[in-house]
Every structure is written in C-alpha cells, then in structure tokens.
Amino acid sequence: MTFTTEGQWPSYTYIVPQIYTRSKVRLVGLGTYTPKGIITNEFFAHISTRLGDPRKAEDLERVTGLQTRHVRTNTLDLCRSMAGDDAPGLIYHPDAPAEESLVDMAVIAAKRAVASAGRAISEIDTVIGASSSDNDAFPTIAGWVQSRLGLPPVRATMLRGACACQTEAFQICAEVLAGSSARLVLLVTSEGLLPNIMNVLDWKTSSLFGEGAAAFLLERGDEDTYIINGADARLAQSLIYQTPLRKDVVEMAEVDIKIRQLYREGRGKELAQLLSTYMVGYTKMNGKEVYRAAPRAMAESVDALCRHAGVHPDELAHIVPHQANSRITRRLGELLINDYGWPESTMEKLADNFRYYGNLSNASIALALTELLRQGQLHDGEWMALPAVGGGMNYGSWLLRYHALKNPDALLNPEE
C-alpha cells in the first residue's frame, strides 16, 4: 500500500474517509448461536427444477460456494409448506425447539458473550441491537434482551437495516463508551431473513441465507480502534426491502396465493416476473450490482482505516468481512491488491466460513470470528479489520486489535 500525502486520499467511490471514529474500545466478549435445523442445496435445486430452471445441488455449490444453512425448526416448516412435502434437503434436529424466535437466539448469544468475558450480566449498562429481519417493532429485540437478561431499565437501542448495521452498531458502541455514558456495552444481533423478508420460492436469493444470532461485549480500553461507515441510497435498487404496512396485508396475501399457484404449476418465468414487480414485503436483489458495489465498498473501508491508523497491510493479521458470499470475499481481496497496492498475501488473511452457514446478515462477522478462534488462528494483539456492506446501500468497517477472551470455552463449547 502506498500512503498518500497527508490530507490526500485515493479516489474512493463510496467512502468519505475524513468522517470516522477513533476511540479507545476493547472487545472483551463474544457469543454466537446457530439453530440446529439444516437446509441443503438439494432443497433449492428441487425448487429451481420445479420452476423450469433446473439446477443440481452441485451447480448451486459451485456458483455460491455454499453447502448448508442452519435454520430454526419453524423455518423448516415454512419451507416445507411452500415447496411441498416431497421437497428434499430439509433436515430436522430432534432436540431443536419447535418454535424459536429471534429474541430467543439473541439471548443465548448474549449469555455466551458475557460468559466468555468472565463478567456478570449485572455489569451491562447499555444494550445496542441490530437486525435486518426484526419483526418486533416495539419492544425491540434490544429491549426484550434487556428484559430477559434481568437488567434494570437501562438504555436499549435498536438499529434496523441490512447487513452493515453490524459495523454501524460497532461505531455507536464506541461513541457511547467514548462519551462515558456507559462502561460495559452489549451489542446483540439476530437474523431470520428467510421467513421474514423474502419469499422461499425466490430461490436465487433465498438460497444464500441462513439464520443465527451474535453478541459482542465492549468496554473502554487502552488502545485506539478506528471505525467508519457510510450510506448511499442512490444504490438502493441493488438490494432493497420495503416493510409491508397494514394497507398492504390483503394485497400481499393475494400475491402469496398467486406465487404458490404458479409454483405448483411450474410457471417459473411468471413467478419471477411477479416477484420482480411486486415491491412490498420481499427483498429485491440485483446480484450483478451487488457484486460490483459490495466488495469495493468494503475494500475502501478497510484501506481508509488502515491509513488513518498507520497500520501497514503487513501488520494486519485478519480481514473478517460480512459473509455475503465467497465470491464477494475474494473480490474484496483482489481490489485491495490491484487498486490500493496491498501485497498478494492479503488473500490469505480473508476469513470465509460462508460455505457452512450462508449469509447471516448482521450476525455473520461474529460467527466468522468464532470459527477463526475455533481453528486457533486468532492471537492476542493482532490487528484485524471487520468490514461489512448491506442493502440500502450501507457500508463500513471496524479496525481493532484482538485480545484473548478470558473464558473462550463459553463460546466454543457452550453449556446452553
């Protein structure tokens, strides 16, 4: 990487590098949770074939790099009701609860984060939540977690947005701690996109996602960390979602009935047309536009923060991006190398666990960190960058040093 003259920056497309947060924050706890149900590629291959655009499971794995997704039992039930009782690739777990909410998952992740830090729940004085699939308008997931943990009525703030809400939440946590309005902040994320904001039969989109929750525990530290975020609604059409209102309910029910009818009749082109034109209640994604914009926005975020911190790429041990898909992760590395002068070794620093979990939206970075820790790849004092990009379009990154958890077993081998 070639550092520019002071006050000058590369020609970034998305990031405004001068607007960032520098704060002394330490990550002391980490918790994750993935449900026990599994969806394999056979399920989505079955749907695509039924709709006249046949794919094999191997085709889907080759294109996406994805093998399995972890989901709740209630999501498996929805998939079966949508695709038919004969649909393969839906694997139930005998010990999984029949009903499991986003809040249920978030509470488990939060308890694991607190235990991994060797701290007491009673020490938490702020809860920040983030989700792109939250269906709790109020109380929010953050509020429910605060209540379920038995905390007093402390601040509980919720961010609702796409996959880069996790980096925006990092920045809010850092600013809360820097302002001394809290001493120990719990950040919780929980996601169930498949049943909540998309149609299962829209297989080109729904096949990319899994479910899960994550939590971070943060406090004031002795070392500087750097966080940046940005937004550009002009790019909304690349990945957009509109929440249905009361007035939309009847029309949406009629559209759902029509979608199921078209699926049963194998009229895939008409079903795809309906999904592309009906603008309420279902996520719309332009894959080509996402692939063009997402890796570059994350690359810019990482590059800008390293320049702010004076951290040379050789000093950065890990880049742990939002796990959108494996192709986007690889493209992120290529852009850092080709456009910003990073060394070829950058590719070896990219974390990619998309294959087994899918896109977990705002819970994805934490799960990728957990897998690195499980593999013994995280070491005390190492610099790591945590970039994300999401619909809307939003993007950002957190640059920090990793410090060993006091009780990593609570994360890697949880009792609950």
Image: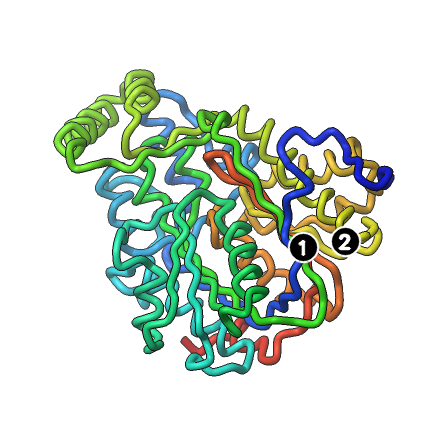
Callouts 1 and 2 close, C-beta under 8 Å: yes
- Horizontal and vertical percent for residue 370? 58, 63
- Horizontal and vertical percent for residue 263? 25, 26
Q: Residues within 10 Å of mark 2 (few under 14, many from 20)?
A: some
Q: Residue at x 54, y 76 (%)?
A: 116
- Please determine whether, in this image, residue 88 is positioned above or below residue 124: above
* 303 left or right of 14 in image: right
Q: Quadrant of the N terminus?
A: top right
Q: Residue at x 68, y 38 (%)?
A: 300
- Please determine whether, in this image, residue 219 is positioned above or below residue 208: below
Q: Quadrant of residue 157?
A: bottom left
* 349 left or right of 395 in image: right
User: Observer-nearest residue: 258 or 301?
Assistant: 301
Q: Secondary structure at mark 2?
A: helix
Amino acid residing under circle 1: Tyr
Identify the residue under disc 1: 226
- Horizontal and vertical percent for residue 359? 48, 45
Identify the residue under disc 2: 309
User: Observer-nearest residue: 394 or 347?
Assistant: 394
Q: Quadrant of residue 97?
A: bottom left
